[in-house]
Every structure is written in structure tokens, then in C-alpha cells.
Image: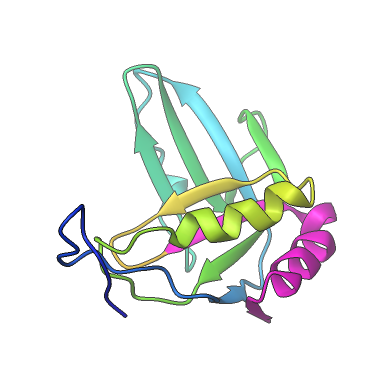
Amino acid sequence: MSGPRGPQGEGVSEPEASHELLVLAVRFAICQFGAGALVPDWIDGGAFWSVCRTADELSLVCEEERVPAGVRAEKGFSCLKVVGPFDLDEVGVLATLTAALAAAGVSLFAISTYETDYLLVRERDLPVAIDALREAGHVVQF
């Protein structure tokens, strides 16, 4: 769907009224390392993982079972994949989803890729997140 871009209305696509999300079947962890840490070999595996380095830290997201003992990690996350792909110029995809979760009091950790977005929520909050997203008109499947 396309719509206005900037004041002249050229090319920015409007977000769709609803999105389809898929709950991934495994539990995830969010890990933190110091800025100079190397990306560990154990991250490479599973169907979904992410690495982000900044000047301040190295953050990893991976399947919970891959995280060795002693690693600083928050465990117990469920992941909702937004079914894509989306054009990089599409506006408001994350906003429509995160607004529904924020209104329901659900904290999230978002990851974006070239084609789509992933929303990690605490496993204990998954039922509330699903209800909030469905109530907002989105489709959530397992």
C-alpha cells in the first residue's frame, strides 16, 4: 500500500491497519558483554539470533538454551515475528505494534532486520501481549 511521502505526498507507504505476527516456538535470552568483548562462537546456531555492537556494549539475542552459565543474561523471552517483508520506507509498522503493547503495560525489546521486525516480550507477558495485539486488530499465530 502506498501513500504520501513528505509534504508533496510522494512515495512513503502508509502502515497497514493490521499486521500478522508469528510466535516463535523457543525461548530467548538477551545477553550483555563489555564494549571490547568478542562475539562468542556459541551464538552461531538456531533459527534466530542477533548481534549488536555499540561503543558501550555488545548485546546478543539467542535461544535461551545456548547461553552458557556465567554469562550476564536476561532469560525467559518469547519472540513475535512480524510477517513481512516490509519496504524500508514503510512508516509506522513498529509504532502500531508497540503502541498496543505499551497500552497493555507490556515491556518489549525490538529488533529490526532488512525485511521485518521482531518483538521480544517476557514469556510471562505473552498472553497479555497477544490479547493486546489482537484487540488492536492484529493477527497473532503460533
The residue that appears at 67% across and 57% down in the rendered structure is 100
Identified at 46% across, 34% down, the residue is 59
In this view, the residue in front, 37 or 60, is 60
Q: Is residue 105 left or right of residue 32?
A: right
Rendered image coloring scheme: rainbow
Quadrant housing residue 3: bottom left
In screen coordinates, is 89 left or right of 141?
left
Residue 85 visible in the shown view = yes
Left or right: where 36 falls relative to 61: left
Q: In what quadrant of the picture does the N terminus appear? A: bottom left
Q: Can you give x and y, in whole percent of width and height, for residue 35 in the image? A: 38, 18
Residue 89, above or below 56: below
Q: Is residue 72 left or right of residue 132?
A: left
Q: In the rendered image of this protein, does residue 71 appear above or below residue 119?
A: above
Per the rendered image, the range of residues in magenta is 117-142
Residue 80's image quarter? bottom right
Between 114 and 3, the one lying in front of the other is 3
In the image, residue 93 above or below residue 55: below
Point out residue 128 in the picture as x, y percentages from the top left corner.
Answer: 83, 60
The verdict on residue 118 being magenta is: yes
**Residue located farthest toward the front when viewing the structure as drawn:** 8
Residue, x 64% and y 46% (percent of image)?
108
- Residue 102 covered by magenta stretch: no
Res. 65 visible in picture: no
Q: Position of residue 84 (x, y in %)?
A: 40, 76
